[in-house]
Image (spheres, rainbow, N blue to C red):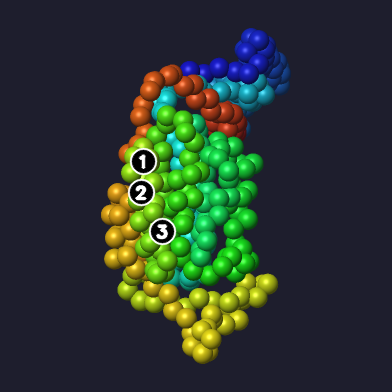
Amino acid sequence: MLFFNYEEYKIAVYILFGFLFVLYLFLYRRKSAWLKAFGQRSLIGRFSKIPTIHRNLLKGACISAACCTMGMVILQPKWQTTQDHYEKEGLEIVFVLDVSISMLAEDVKPNRLQRAKMEISHLVQGLEVDRVGLVVFAARAFSLLPYPTNDYERVFLRILNMINENYVRFVPYGTNIGNAFILAMNTFSKEDTKKVMILLTDGEEQVITRSQVAEAVKLLLERRDIAIYVVGIGDLKKASPIPKKDKEGSVTGYEVTEEGETIYTKPNPTFLREIAEMVGGTYQHDATGNELRHIFEQVLERHKNIVGIKKKNIIKDVSQYFLGGALALLALYFIL
C-alpha cells in the first residue's frame, strides 16, 4: 500500500499537475496563433519540425506528470507491506570461548579466535529476546558476565571485543575445559527458561581436564535443563604454527618451546567427542570457520519455541522510484 508522509499536501500536487497542463495548452494556443499570423501553417510545417497537435498534447502531459512526480518525491512516498512476525520464546545462551594461545593459529582465517568472535557477534546481533553470557578459558576459566544479559551492543559485544591477542597472551597457558564447564553452569540463572551452552575450542587436551569434566558431569546430573554443544575449530589434517606479531600486525616469528622448537597446534576431535559424550552434549567440528554461522543458527533453531504470531508492518522508502519516473518522463518530453 502506497502512502505519503505528508499526505495532506497531496491534493496540492494534483492541482499543480492540472495547472501545468492547462498552462502548457495555453502557451501552445498562443504559439499556434502566432504561427498563424506569421504565415500559412501548412507551408511553415513543410519547412520546419513543428510538432503535431497530438504530440504537443503528449509533451504537455509528460512535462506536467514529471513535475507532479517530483512533487511527490518531496511528500516522501512510502510502501507498506504486512508480514507475519513469529514471536519466539527467549533462551539463555552462554558462550564458552577458548582463549588459549593455540587459538591464535591461522589455519582458520583470520585466526581461530577472531573467526569465533566474528561468528558469535553475528549471531548475537540477530537476537531479540534471548539473554547471553560469556565465559572464557585457558588454564583457568573466567566469567566475563556475572549473569546473562540482553543488552547486546553496550554490554556483551563490548566485552567480546576486548578479547584480543594481548588478552590471550595475558591469561595462563592451557586449555582447561572442565573448569570452563563448571563456571559456565553457574552463570545461568535459576529461572525456568531454556538454557543452551555453546563451547567453542580447538581441543588441545590437558591432563587436568578429565578430572574436572567428571566433576562437571556430576553438576550436570543436577541441571538437566542445560543443552550443551561442543564446537571444534581448526584444520584436522595438519598442525599449524602459532604466529607472533608486532604492533603493525606483521608476523615476526612463531611460538617456540623452551628448547627452541616451533610449537604446532592441531585440534583433537576424538578428545572433544569424548568430552561431549561425557556431559551429554553434541559435538560438531568446523575445520575452516565457514560452517560456524550455520552451526550456531542450527543450535538456536533447535531450541526456539514459537509462542505467538503478530502482524508486522514493513515500511520502505520508494522516493527513488518516483525520482526515476520523473527523469524518464522528462527524457520522453525531450525525445518527443
Residue at 56%, 68% in the rendered image: 172
Residue located beneath label 1 in the image: 222
Q: Work out whether residue 226 or residue 69 is closer to the camera in this orientation and state it.
A: 226
Check if mark 2's residue and mark 3's residue have beta carbons within 8 Å: no
Could you give the CA–CA distance between mark 2 and mark 1, rounded to whole angstroms?
Answer: 7 Å
Q: Quadrant of residue 52?
A: top right
Mark drawn on residue 218: 2
Mark 2 or mark 3: name the one nearer the start of the chain.
Answer: 3
Could you give the CA–CA distance between mark 2 and mark 3, rounded to whole angstroms?
Answer: 10 Å
Please, what is the three-letter code of the amino acid marked with disc 1? Glu
- The vertical placement of 191 against 61, above or below, is below
- Counting from the top left corner in percent of width and height, residue 27 is at 69, 17
In the picture, measured across the screen, residue 280 lies left or right of residue 154, that is left
Residue located beneath label 3 in the image: 212
Q: Work out whether residue 204 or residue 117 is closer to the camera in this orientation and state it.
A: 204
Q: Is residue 110 visible?
A: no
**Element at label 1:** helix
Mark drawn on residue 109: none
Could you give the CA–CA distance between mark 3 and mark 1, rounded to whole angstroms?
Answer: 16 Å
Residue at 35%, 56% in the rendered image: 214
Residue at 39%, 73% in the rendered image: 266
For the C terminus, the quadrant is: top right
Q: Is residue 176 visible?
A: yes
- Counting from the top left corner in percent of width and height, residue 131 is at 51, 37
Mark 3 or mark 1: name the one nearer the start of the chain.
Answer: 3
Please, what is the three-letter code of the amino acid marked with disc 3? Gln
Please, what is the three-letter code of the amino acid marked with disc 2? Lys
- Counting from the top left corner in percent of width and height, residue 247 is at 68, 72
Q: Work out whether residue 320 or residue 102 is closer to the camera in this orientation and state it.
A: 102
